[in-house]
Amino acid sequence: MKNVIINEKDNVGVCLDGTETIPAGHKYALTDIAKDEYVIKYGEIIGRATTAIEKGEWVHTHNVRSHLDENVAYSYDFHAETFPKTKATFKGFKRAKGRAGIRNEIYIIPTVGCVNNVCIRLAKEAQKFVKGSIDGIFALTHQFGCSQLGEDNANIKKLLCAIALNPNAAFVLFVGLGCENNGMDGIKEYLAPYERDNIEYFNAQDVEDEHEYGMAILEKFAEKAAKFEREDVDFSELCIGLKCGGSDGYSGLTANPLVGKITDKVVSLGGSAILTEVPEMFGAEQLLMNKCRSEEIFEKYKKMIEDFKAYYTKQGFPVYENPSPGNKKGGITTLEEKSLGCVEKAGTSEIVDVLAYGELVKETGVSALNAPGNDLIAATALAASGCQIVLFTTGRGTPFSTFVPTMKISSNSRLAKHKTGWIDFNAYDMDEDGLFELIVKTVNGEYKCLSEDVREIAFYKTGVTL
């Protein structure tokens, strides 16, 4: 049996190839484990045995349960690595304000789902304007913008505006209906402090022919965008998003640690990274808290965790309502195990900031972002906070993409060979140089992620819909 033991403290190993009794990527006992004894992986507690487990026996949901404590107290004990900074550049599109883009695109953003078809039709016909350095014209449709109350209504406006400020957008056209809650006046007011001259707006009810009106704006945008050229840009202007989905027993061994090495590399070059999926930090949150740069950041991080736990409990759900059926089939038993593998993507760098949902990244280094674990919602939130690319690790596979390039990194070779149309890079061999080279090629526009023809957004909805 080919296997791996991650930490000398562990009492379980991982069976890499699988046997007749233990599926590939699943755990087996390194020693006898008594009932109620801790199960240890990554050198940390991932659960308790629900029955006595013999040495060599399969260890999974049938004999292990979560050990999460919803009322755990947190402390701060700083422990993170700092890296000597080096200089590097990439080929990007410099913007008049804000960070440089790695794509040169035009976004059409509906303020409300009622005008989705208007935006789709505009984007379809506007493809005739794509020329020069333009990478595409995309309608970023969604179903909200009206009938939402309170925080939901505020978050929709905040997120759409943040999307419009993403560096990959050369120009942005907001299309409204004219009678929605998420009205155009509110959008304009929110964006006014940013003083952007690459955004235009109109309400379909206010013009005689919304298609003709929108096409005239898009043609003007395209004439200007086509002339933009890639230039040398300092790496400090790059921000990568860190996301995993459809994880399996290999994710915490290969893809996530490999992306963690990339995170440390980007930070050492002066760049930024954002980690999110707050519910998939439960069980590993203390490790991340100890990486916070200061007590002030620690307090912000702790509040984010405690607020998300309260959100669960107020809805009547335990915080450990995770992993998914696919995670379990792939070898992940408890939320603690999933979380400990998930946070590997952040590398060993310190956490320099904690961002609210829809808030733009401000600091170089690693920031934590308040958003749920759902793949499209979390990836959208990462890109809205300013990430020009999302590194998405997966053990099960998925074809989705948010509105920025979403690079799929497989945790195992079987998936990479099975889904060649989905997977951009196979992390099983832990080829750090190979992955970084592909990321640089993607950033420079020399490689396009396999899912870049798909552009989707989704919101974190928490309240009432009328």
Image (cartoon, grey):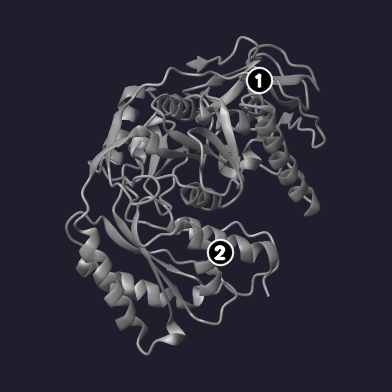
Q: Please tell me which of labels 1 and 2 falls first in the chain.
A: 1
Q: Residue furthest left?
A: 132
Secondary element at tag 1: loop
Number of residue marks: 2
x, y (%) of residue 275? 54, 37
| In-front residue for pair 326/80 | 80
- Give, as a three-letter code, the residue at label 1: Phe
Image position, residue 299 (x, y; %): 71, 34
Q: Which residue is mark 2?
A: 157
Observer-nearest residue: 322 or 104?
104
Q: Is residue 391 above or below residue 428?
A: below
Residue 406 shown left or right of residue 12 in the figure: left
Give the class, few, some or many, for how many residues have Cα within 10 Å of label 1's Cα (few <14, many ≥20): some
x, y percent for residue 435: 34, 29
Q: Residue 78 has which mark?
A: 1
The residue sitting at 53% across, 58% down in the picture is: 159
Q: Disc 2 marks which amino acid?
A: Lys
Above or below, comparing residue 333 to residue 463 in the picture: above
Secondary structure under tag 2 reads helix
